[in-house]
Structure formats: structure tokens, C-alpha cells
Image (spheres, rainbow, N blue to C red):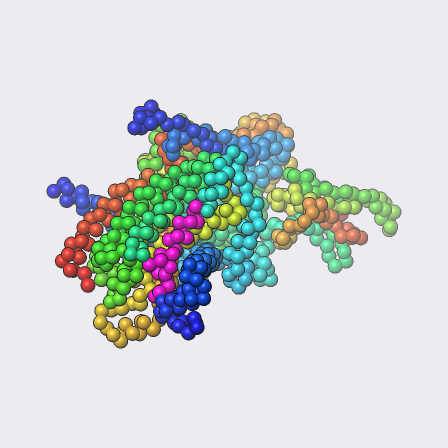
Amino acid sequence: MRIIKNIGQYFGEIFHAIKSLLTGMKITGYYFFHPKEIVTQQYPENRDTLKMFDRFRGEVVLIHDSNNEHRCTGCSACELACPNGTIEIINKKEIDPETGKSTKAIDQFVYHLSMCTFCNLCIIACPTDAIKMAQTFEHSVFDRSKLTKVLNNPGSKLMPGIRE
Amino acid sequence: MSTEQTVLGNETQEYFINMGPQHPSTHGVLRLLLTLDGEIIRKVEPHMGYIHRSIEKMCEKDSYQQIVHLTDRMDYLSCHINNEAVCLTVEMGLQLEIPERVKVIRTIISELTRLASHQLWWGVMGMDLGAITGFLYGFRDRELITDIFEETCGARLTMNYNVPGGLMFDIHPNFQKRTKEFLAYFKKKLPEYEELLTGNVIFEERTKGIGYISKEDVISYGVTGPSGRGSGFACDIRKLHPYSAYDRVEFKEILYNEGDSYARYMVRMDEMKESMHIIDQLIDNIPEGDYKAKTKAVIKLPAGEYYQRVETARGELGVYIISDNKKSPYRVKFRSPGFSNLSALDTMAKGCKIADLVAMMSTLDLVIPDIDR
Amino acid sequence: MILLNFSIYDFSDFINSIDTWLVETFSPTIGHLIGLVLVGTCFLLFTALLGLSLVYIERKVCAFFQQRLGPMRVGPFGTAQTIADIIKLIFKESLITKQSDKFLFNLAAFVIMMAPFIVLSAIPFAKGLQALDMDIGLFFIISVSSIGVTGILLAGWSSNNKYSLIGAMRSGAQIVSYELSVAISLMTIVILTGSLQLSEIIASQSNGWWIFKGNIPAIIAFVIYIIASTAETNRGPFDMAEAESEITAGFHTEYSGIKFAYFFLAEYVNFFIISAVGATVFFGGWMPLHIGDATFFNNAMDFIPPIIWFFGKVAVIMYFLMWFKWTFPRLRIDQLLTLEWKYLLPISIVNLLLMSIVALKGWHW
């Protein structure tokens, strides 16, 4: 009796094993015959239709309007908020042609993309909403020095009415 | 040992092999010095430090807002939970009252993070055992969660969505819709995971009874999280010391008593269901309100010591901050789950084979930057 | 002339006419020698083509199992991908580890190519398209294909790498044990055919394939053959010798460039051979599907050329083997040996006995 029971167990194990293997094969087999469910995309080909989410953090940009004016007062709040020293603000003295008073304005808004960890702290620290995160993500360049960018356009000015 | 060494009168010799720092299944730059007798493991000696970035020291020069983003880089698979741990510690020090909305959103995103982490772990577990197809199925489903994160938080991996006092910004209008879509989708896909691996006879042979560790050993090594619960050690911080919105949701703490690789695997599989259950309860009940409590621009914690622990996807993460009432902490210490879990590897692996070691490391779900920090 | 006798249905006249032409034009010795060189060149070209196409097919099939697209860049649908890979491998530096046994290290790559190359000569591709039709054809295939393990052991030993050594030792244990099951399951069919000659095995299936005619034992034998031969060629889920997640790449860890390509090629040629032998013994090789005396049906099936039947059957078996590989986790080495010695070998021996009874009683068709 015990031998029969053992033999039964032996074959029971084999059948259980085969069944479990077949259930696994059913799943992979299903996907093989349903190529519509393929999830991978062909990236550079779909570049035109590829759209990032609005909040995606690609890189920091300084917003300029059509008059080549920005909202950055050079207060360095972003520079202080940045954990990695990614942002460097170089200020210059500027003499207001109307009042004749000398005011502070940005000379260069330097952004080291190579050091940025995209933590978004500079954006929330900015009191005048002068900077934002752009959705670009193709950052690779052949020379590391190209990752250091000056964000303010040449000849750009502070938008009037921001400092108040 | 001596009897096995002289099988049939042939003396065998132990030898060493370096598994890592570059090895496909150490999941990073962990180096294991194995003492082997043929294929049988006599001793496992983990060597760490290959990805040490001195995060704890860097915290001492950073402001409390800046610390948060560093924790993304520790256990990158449960980065939101790491962020939350630091924020909770700082909020505890400031005795801030956090809006209900923040608590609920944090809980939902934490559970989504846990789901994403377990999905990736499931895929990697399959890959370590040789079933590479599972790896891609795991990633396929994880992509949908990272999409949710990307839309709401702005990043796919290192989200940095929490700030001391609340959240960086409010959830995206699509957040609830997307999350519900994902849950409906994943409830259909989870049975697939079970059919592909859990019931598979080869998988059962490879994991059942392998890498046993007793409850006593688990407690003495400080193994927490799913790895600890696989040995019957009730260590779920979400149950023991509820934080955020865990006190108002109903969920089970998954416990298995077998203590082997299969038990640890099953804990994570069941935890995925529990995580979905938690999100189900909260996703329609996000209270209205602010997404951030009012904090000063420069946070200074009152002098003292603060400790807060949370349950990450890998176990108990403790954040210990000593403050001397300056804008950056005097000392920060992270009690990372991976470090303690790794310490149990030697006990588990003794007498097993190399292939078993790979399976065991998978069920411990090690993330090397979490161990080294 | 030669080409006059060419027929897609029967190559024997074609081959014979080439042979006669060679012998008549040159002296018999030189004619035969040229014939040998010609056959060898054909097989070299065939192996290269086989390797190229199989690597591509496997990558594509694997991709579809995994919901991916697979190679898509080089050529239309990535068809030229493997050619690009081969060019890259040819130009890659061939590294040799320090203090390795350089002679054996280089030799291993050739030894491992030898076995499958010799075995290919005994495979009947179509009617009359077979290099060696020995009366011990099946025995020849079984014995020669086991030479391959020497190459693996040499590679593992000479690499001066512990991972390679572990992989080689695993592979040695694995191939030696699984040969038994492969041989016995093939013997099960030999009981019915009464001959080891492959052409006769095929001829005996002219009224139906053995998998249908041979009753239940033939089906069991086929299942055992598939499992054991997968293990013998070190393919997943029995790829213990490579096991990239455990011992990096096993015996060919230290090989690079063209020598690595040899290992890769040998693996795929072996893969083809086990499918071809399985198709020949169980599914009638190039023999079209015939049902007893149903003349009309048989004639309709005969219309499809034998070479297409052969490669079609091989492709189906290969597809199933790929399906296994891309679905299952890998076994552990001791479980692998347990499977062989405790399950496959006893079952196949009992099956052999069963088949003998079936053959004696005439229960097969």
C-alpha cells in the first residue's frame, strides 16, 4: 500500500510540476501572439509626438518675454537654496538713466547643469518667479564645458515694476 | 565541516571568490568575499564603501530643506518614503501642525512608491533566478507608477516632492484619475506575476527552505521590513507607530513564519495587495486644504535630539537629528534598513550554494546606496 | 550536365551527378578530395548562416515574449543586426588572461566548434541531402556531440578564473548525466525502427511519424528528449554553465572577440542539432506528413518540398525550446542532477521497457 501511495505521490508531483510550468508558458505565449501589447517605444523616431509632463524637471531656465526682459532681480535666493552650488549669480551695478540712482542688476546668471540634481528648490525659493523648470531632456553634449550655461539673454533687462 | 571536507577520502580545499563589486546580481557595487568549498558557501563577508558619498556628513552643512533631496539618493527605490522620514523629523522638531491633505497625499504616494519598489524587486528576483522575462514585466508596470510621479512630482526616480511642512506643490489634477486607472490595471496584472513565478515548480524548488533565518536571529541582527516579517517578526512601523495617515486606514501586517526565501517573497507579494488596498481607501477621500503648512524660509530646529522612523519598502528607516539651534543640523544619522538586512546574509547563506546566495540576496532586496549612504 | 538532374524533391541524383562529374573530370582520388572540400565549405557557410539567422530569430522571439520590439535599427526590422555584431566581434581585441594556459585557452574555442560541426555532417536535410549516411548514424551523433564538453572543460580550466572553473565543472556534471537520458529516449524509437541509420529511420516514417505511430511511450520519450537535450546544450532553463546572474558568464567569461563568437556559434549550432535530431527521429525529418494509406492526402503533402518540411519541423521545435528558455527560472546544479537521476533516467528506462512491450505486442501502428 505504502509503495502505491509513494508512486502516486511521485507522479502527482510530476503532474503538478508540469501544470505549473504550463501556466507560466501560457502567459509568455499570450504576449508572444499579441504584439499589439508591446510597450517599448522607438525613441528618436517618436521625438515629434513625445511630450513631457508640464512639471517635468529638465533644466532651469530664466523666463524672458518678447521685449527681452526677465524678472530676475539678482537677489540670490536661488543660489542660497541650491544644495550643490549649481547656480552662480554675478551682479553688476547699473545706473538708472531716469533717476540717476545706482541699482543692482544681474550681469550673468550662471547655471552649471552638470552639478544640478533637479531638486526644484531654487524654483520655489525664487520670490519673483523669474526661473522655471523647462521640459527639455536631451542634455548630452560632447564637451563638459557646454553644460555651464548663462541663462540671461545678452542685452536683456529687468522687467519694470518687479523690484517693488 | 571536517566530514564534508573529506568525502571519499579526498581532501578538498576551501577557496575564496570575490563576488562583486562588479557582478550582475549584487545589484550595485557590493563586494562579497565568499569562502567556498566547491559550490558550498562556508562564509560570506560583505565589503562595503564602494558607493559611499558621505550623505550624513553632507547633511551637516545643508539646510533642512536641502537635506531632503539627499535622501532621494539613499534608497532610490523608496525615495519618497525617505523624504517623508526627514520631513517628519523636522516637523516633529518644529512641532508643526501638518494639514490633513498633506498626510493623506503623503500616504498615497508612499504606498505607490512601495508598489513600484516591489514591482522592480519582483522583476529583479525573476532575473536573478534566470527568468529574465519577469524583469521586463515588472518594469512594464512600474513605468505607469513613474508616470504618475512624473506628472505630479516632476521626476521619475528622485522626486524630492516633500518639503518640511508639507509638499512642494499640490497634486496634479490628473493624479486621482491616473492612480485609479493604474490600480484597475495592476489588479489584473498581479495574478500574472503569481502565475509566472509564485506557482512555478522550479521557483518553489529554488526558494522553499533556502536561506532560513530564525525569528531570534532576525531580531538580533535588526532585520526589518518584509525580510524580517518573513521570519514572523512583527516590525511594521506603519502598525507600531503610525505616522501620516496610516492610523486611519485598515490594512493587514503580512507575517510569514517560515523564515526562508519563499516566505520573504510571499510577504512582498501580499504587501503589494495591501498597498493597493490602502490606496483604494484614500484615493477618493483626499481632504481639501493647504498642501503646505506655513514655515519660515530658514528653518532652525530647537536644540535637542529628534528621532523618527518610517517603514520603507525595505524596512525600518530611522532619521536621527541632533540640532544645536542653527540652520543646519549638528549631526544626522540614518538607520538604513539595507545595512542591517545585509548583516544577516552570512547566517542565512552558510551551507548553501552560490545559486542560493543569489536568490537570498534578491529576497533581502538590497539597494547598495542605501547600505553605503 | 550537372544541373539537369536538379529537383527540389530529391537531391540524390543531383549530388550523384556532381560526384560523377568530379570523378570523371579529375582522377578518382582528387575528385573525392575536391568533393570533401566542397562539402566542408558548404557546411562552413551553412554554420555561419545558421548562427547569424538563429541569433537574430532568438532575439526577436525573446523580445516578443517580453513585450519588446527587439533589434530594429540595423537594416529593415533589424535584420542586419547580427552581421553588425559579427563585424564588431571580429574587430574586437582578443584578450587573454594573465597566467592562463594560453595554448589550451585558444584550443578550447576550436574544440567547442568541432563537435557540432562533425555532427552536422550526419544530419539529413532533405532526401539525398546528407553528407554521411552511416549505418550507425544515430549512435555517431550521440557519441560525437558529447565531445563538446571537452571544449567547455578546457575553456573553464585554462581561463585562470574561478567563475569559469565553476561553470565548466557544472557543465561537465550536467552534460555527462543528461547524455544518458538523451540516448535512452532516442533508443526508444530505435526499437521501433530497428535501425540506427538515419535514412532508414526516416523511411520507416513514410506512413506516419513515430510520435503518432509509437503510442504513449513515444510521446514520453519525446518529452524526455526535449528536456534532456536542452540541458545537454546548456540552454535555459538549464544554463547552469553560464548562469550570468550567478557566475557572470561561466566558462566563457574570459573570452572576447572572435573566440567568444565561436562559443556563441557553437551554442546555436548545438541548438539546431538537437532540434534537427528530434525532428528526424520523432517527426520524420524531411518526410512529409503521411497518414497510412490516404493516398490523396499523402500526395498533397508530398507537394511541399522535403527541405521545407525539415526546416519547418526544426523551427517549431526551436520555438518551443525558446519558449521554455524565456519563461522559466534557472534550476540549481544539485536540483538539475536530481531531476536527471531521480526523474528523467528512471522514467526513460521504464519507458524503454514499455516501448519494448509495445513493439513486441505490435501495439504501435
Q: Residue furthest bottom?
A: C296
Quadrant (top left/top right/bottom left/bottom right) for the N terminus of chain C: bottom left
Answer whether residue A37 is visible to the viewer in this image.
no
Quick one: C122 or B91, which is closer to the camera? Answer: C122
Answer whether residue A100 is visible to the viewer in this image.
yes
Marker count (numbered): 0
Judge from the rendering whether residue B364 lies leftward or rightward of residue C227; answer left or right: right
Judge from the rendering whether residue B336 lies leftward or rightward of residue C317; answer left or right: right
Q: Is residue B14 above or below residue A112?
A: above
Q: Is residue C345 magenta?
A: no
Residue at figure coordinates x 79%, y 46% from the top left: A107
Quick one: C102 or C69, which is closer to the camera? Answer: C102
Residue at figure coordinates x 41%, y 37% from the top left: C166
- Report x, y in % for residue C175: 35, 44
The span shown in magenta is: C111-133
Q: Is residue C118 magenta?
A: yes
Q: Residue furthest left?
A: A1
Quick one: C236 or A121, which is closer to the camera? Answer: C236
